[in-house]
Image (cartoon, rainbow, N blue to C red):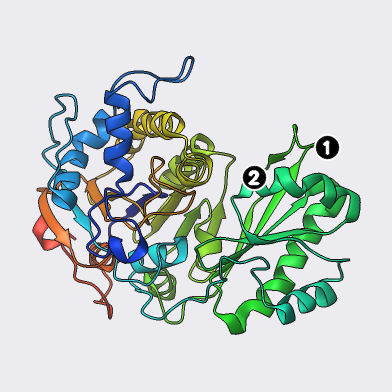
Amino acid sequence: MARAFLFVLDSFGIGGAADAERYGDAGANTFAHIAEACAEGRADREGLRSGPLFVPYMGSLGLGKAAETATGLGFASGGTDLLATAFHGAAQEVSSGKDTPSGHWEIAGLPVLFDWGYFPDTVPAFPAALTEAIIREGKVPGILGNCHAAGTEIIERFGEEHIRTGKPICYTSVDSVLQIAAHEAHFGLERLYEFCKVVRRLVDPLRIGRVIARPFVGETTATFERTYNRHDYAVPPPEPTLLDRLTARGSRVIAVGKIGDIFAHRGISQVRKGAGNMAMFDEALGAMDDAGDGDLVFANFVDFDTEFGHRRDVAGYAAALEAFDRRLPEAFARLRQGDLLLLTADHGNDPTWRGTDHTRERIPVIGTGPGFKGGDIGLRTTFADIGETVAEHLGLERGRHGTSFYTAIGGHA
């Protein structure tokens, strides 16, 4: 059997979603707008980066072609030639929402065809009964926030009061999420995790997709900083995903980054984490070294989203893409005959867009593997085609959702 490596560049959308207007995102395009800003010198930052966006290795996999498939707009890849074994295309999401679980579940062959629950953009945002239950069952003196907010901004607003009072900071966004920020030392990291488990149970009837622990450190507004000890408490997928199918067969699924959390640790054999994209890339490379026949390495690179997309940091996002791209040859070098490497995204987060939330966009589907013939896979009508292609590559029977493009790229399993 073969091996598969699925790398998700969290939030790296390429525009063009047919239903973007429904989400208020018509015209959003994470990739194109970053590239445009770089070309115009608006993403230059001393000591970080300058000039046009330079991602030649993703270009060699067909990133520019994928962008053209998504929107009709091409991207100059700096003269990069396509690898003979590279395949490229784009995919349209059918799931409800534009958040992490919806995108990842659909990639793993399970579209979200139900509606998540959301909290209104009001103050307070949470129903009174829920707030009372959180305080009572979570054994806290009260909560702060109770509104829609960006994570760093709400910690700046309430962090000092949180330290003084012991009240956790609870907030939400346009996604189906309830986030809880608390100080690692003053509130306690383990206490925060236990508190989130209580809240997870309380929001289950409301169909909230995730409760997220957002720990931070520092003593004043000027020194507060979120840490990498974030933990997501997600609703379990309602039916088997690609991961379940693989582990039931006896294969291993090595989850890198927050993949385990996204799938409520279902269908996961092993979890590996690191502090930041580059540490995560190290973990992914180690997982590639350790993967055996029939195994899947499923990696999420979250910094694109949390550190740069939500913070509307165009230069930072561009620099992160370039840093990721520079390391791709290390992954290429680990590919052996029969392996499949696929790069994609779960949604968009256009750093030039209004607000601080995700953007509804199509995603790139690019990749390679020794022995493949490569080529254009066109516009896929669901992210689930990715999961079905990986499934066919790894010798699984066809699932309920999605259509494999394995034969089109010269599948050889």
Residue 229, given in percent of the width and then of the height, sits at 67, 49
Front residue of this view, candidates 325 and 27: 27
- Name the residue that disc number 2 marks: 153
Dot 1 falls on a residue whose secondary structure is loop
Q: Quadrant of the C terminus?
A: bottom left
Residue 350, given in percent of the width and then of the height, sits at 38, 45
Above or below residue 295? Residue 11 is above
**Which residue is drawn at the image coordinates 43% and 76% (left, top)?**
248
- Crowd around label 1: few <14 · some 14–19 · many ≥20 (10 Å): some
Q: Between disc 2 and disc 1, whose residue precedes?
A: 2
Is residue 19 rendered to the left or right of residue 7? Answer: left
Dot 2 falls on a residue whose secondary structure is helix
Q: Amino acid at mark 2?
A: Glu
**Which residue is drawn at the image coordinates 73% and 82% (left, top)?**
129
- Residue 157 has which mark? none
- Name the residue that disc number 1 marks: 219
Please indicate, yes or no, whether residue 410 appears anywhere in the rendered image.
Answer: no
Is residue 330 rendered to the left or right of residue 210? Answer: left
Residue 94, given in percent of the width and then of the height, sits at 29, 70
**Which residue is drawn at the image coordinates 27% and 77% (left, top)?**
401
Above or below residue 33? Residue 268 is below
Is residue 160 rendered to the left or right of residue 60? Answer: right
